[in-house]
Amino acid sequence: MSWPHAAWRVLLLATVISSAVSCEAERRVMLTCPSPDGTNKAVFWVLLTPSAAGTAYFCLNVAASTRSTSSMISDDKDREESQVMVMQDGGVVRLTWLSSKRLQVEYPEDATLRYASSGAPFSATGVPDLRVVYRGSDTIPDGSDSTCERP
């Protein structure tokens, strides 16, 4: 094998290895919102994928306050049990605890929901008696921050 061909193979192998090392998704908590009685908490966070397109998934998990936030957003069963919403193209939510077991989630009307249904109630596995209601809203201004409201 000639020198240029060997050099290109080494360069290609190094590129593949460095790409594999940096292919881990990044998770960033954007908002933590405890329920009025403090027994549960809602965590709104973003999952940034390492793909060329740089896709962002905005997720909402609800669990007992005793659960660690890191376990709620990890890659295991703990996250699946507490996840109540995934959306794209939103990036902001208004969380309102209507009571200690009822959470209203408002999101931009033009957001793409991947998990959850607008207007539909949902019960999380991790908090069996929790009710979550989703609502697309045109009153969430572009560029605003996520908010947490409690009675």
Image (cartoon, rainbow, N blue to C red):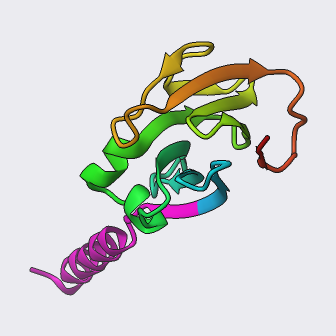
**Does 77 lie within the magenta span?**
no
Q: Nearer the viewer, residue 81 or 8?
A: 81
Residue that appears at 25% across and 50% down: 77
Residue that appears at 61% across and 40% down: 100
Q: Residue furthest left?
A: 1
Residue 10 vs residue 90: left or right? left
Q: Which residues are magenta?
A: 1-28
Residue that appears at 34% across and 76% down: 18
Q: How many marks?
A: 0
Q: Nearer the viewer, residue 96 or 118?
A: 96
Residue that appears at 76% across and 44% down: 150
Residue 66 rendering spot, x and y as whole percentages: 44, 64
Q: Nearer the viewer, residue 95 or 17?
A: 95
**Does 15 lie within the magenta span?**
yes
Q: Nearer the viewer, residue 18 or 35?
A: 35
Looking at the rendered image, the quarter that the N terminus falls into is: bottom left
Residue 107 rendering spot, x and y as whole percentages: 72, 30
The secondary structure that most of the magenta stretch takes on is helix
Looking at the rendered image, the quarter that the C terminus falls into is: top right
Q: Residue furthest top?
A: 119
Residue 133 vs residue 146: left or right? left
Residue 119 rendering spot, x and y as whole percentages: 62, 13
Residue 89 vs residue 59: left or right? right
Give the image quarter of residue 103: top right
Residue 75 vs residue 22: left or right? left
